[in-house]
Amino acid sequence: MPVLTAKDFKNDQEVRWCPGCGDHAVLAAIQRTMPKVSEALNYEKERYVVVSGIGCSSRLPYYMDTYGFHSIHGRATAISTGIKVANPRLTVWQACGDGDALAIGGNHFIHAIRRNIDINVILFNNQIYGLTKGQYSPTSKLGAITKTSPYGTIEQPFNPGSLVLVS
């Protein structure tokens, strides 16, 4: 099996995230990680599937040279678990934002964890709905002033790590 490099997981698409956005660093880290996973587990490139929902983070499959699936809002986890159950040999990587995974897709996220389905969830937690320019999300800090909370949020934010542990 040929040795894979980060370049093997990059495609020719122009990355359209805003300059300075942290999503660029996440993309680069994933592209550097996949060859290491391939080497450690003896995976060929054809075993990788990247799934996403809606939001800035969900552009990730467009920038990966793997199989990909851009699903609808809040359903990335449902699609990811379906792919993994249908073909357990695949290594499924899910890119989702805090709103996509913890708001509309919250129950899918919780139940995938509870069922211990072997998927890799990369949660882009920027504590705001970035693509729609500033509504608060399930992880926005208490009191955060946003377009949809001009007097500050009144809800305690989700802690994704704690949510995973208790699920």
Image (spheres, grey):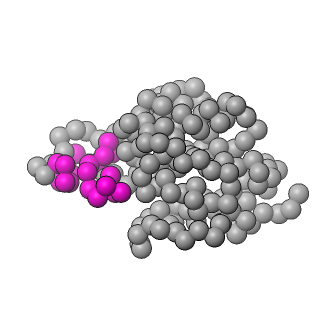
- Where residue 32 sits, quadrant-wise, is bottom right
* Residue at the (76%, 54%) spot, across then down: 45
Q: Residue 8: tell me if it is visible.
A: yes
Whether residue 45 is in magenta: the answer is no
Whether residue 132 is in magenta: the answer is yes
Q: Residue 96's x, y, as percent?
A: 48, 48
Outermost residue to the left:
151
Image side of residue 52 versus residue 18, left or right: right
Question: Relative to the observer, which residue lies in front, 107 or 42?
Answer: 107
Outermost residue to the bottom:
19
* Residue at the (54%, 48%) spot, across then down: 70
Q: Residue 66's x, y, as percent?
A: 68, 55
Q: Residue 161: tell me if it is visible.
A: no
Instruction: Write down the region rendered in magenta.
Output: 129-149
Image side of residue 136 versus residue 29, left or right: left
* Residue at the (59%, 68%) spot, across then down: 13
* Residue at the (30%, 46%) spot, across then down: 137
Q: Residue 37's x, y, as percent?
A: 72, 53
Q: Residue 34's x, y, as percent?
A: 69, 57
Q: Where is the N terminus found, in terms of image quarters?
A: bottom right
Image side of residue 107 versus residue 93, left or right: left
